[in-house]
Image: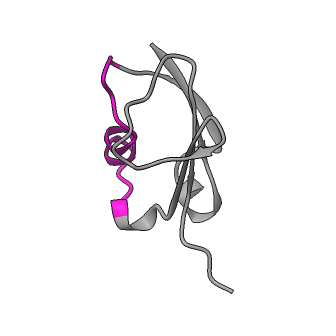
Amino acid sequence: MQATIKLFAQLREGRFKVENIGLNDQTRVMDVVEGLNIPPKDVAICLVNGHDTAIDTVIKNGDTVALFPPIGG
């Protein structure tokens, strides 16, 4: 199964901006976060196909996952 992962702001540092990756069935957003060595506390917003979702959501084939860090201002 394939999914597109998009990282924003400091989550990109040492990683990538957008990448298509192969995933196993029943892979959760949390599994991707951990696989990228991103501490879960560093992910404030998680979108799947443009919709706000929980980090334990199961990713489906063709999904686009966008991960955002906390934003200060």
Residue that extends furthest to the bottom in the rendered view of this protein: 73
Residue that extends furthest to the top in the rendered view of this protein: 1
Q: How many marks?
A: 0
**Identity of the residue drawn at 35% across and 51% down:** 37
Start and end of the magenta stretch? 24-40
Residue 28, magenta (yes or no):
yes
**Identity of the residue drawn at 39% across and 47% down:** 33
**Identity of the residue drawn at 57% across and 18% down:** 62
Q: Position of residue 42 (x, y in %)?
A: 43, 66
Does 24 sit above or below residue 32? above
Given residues 1 and 52, the one toward you in this image is 52
Residue 31, magenta (yes or no):
yes
Q: Position of residue 2 (x, y in %)?
A: 50, 17
Does 70 sit above or below residue 15? below
Residue 13 in which image quadrant: bottom right
Given residues 5 and 55, the one toward you in this image is 55
Q: Indicate left or right for 6 with 55 as reference.
A: right
Identify the colour scheme used.
Answer: one colour
Does 23 sit above or below residue 71? above
Q: Position of residue 32 (x, y in %)?
A: 38, 39
Q: Position of residue 70 (x, y in %)?
A: 54, 72
In which quadrant is the N terminus drawn? top left
**Identity of the residue drawn at 33% across and 28% down:** 27
In which quadrant is the C terminus drawn? bottom right
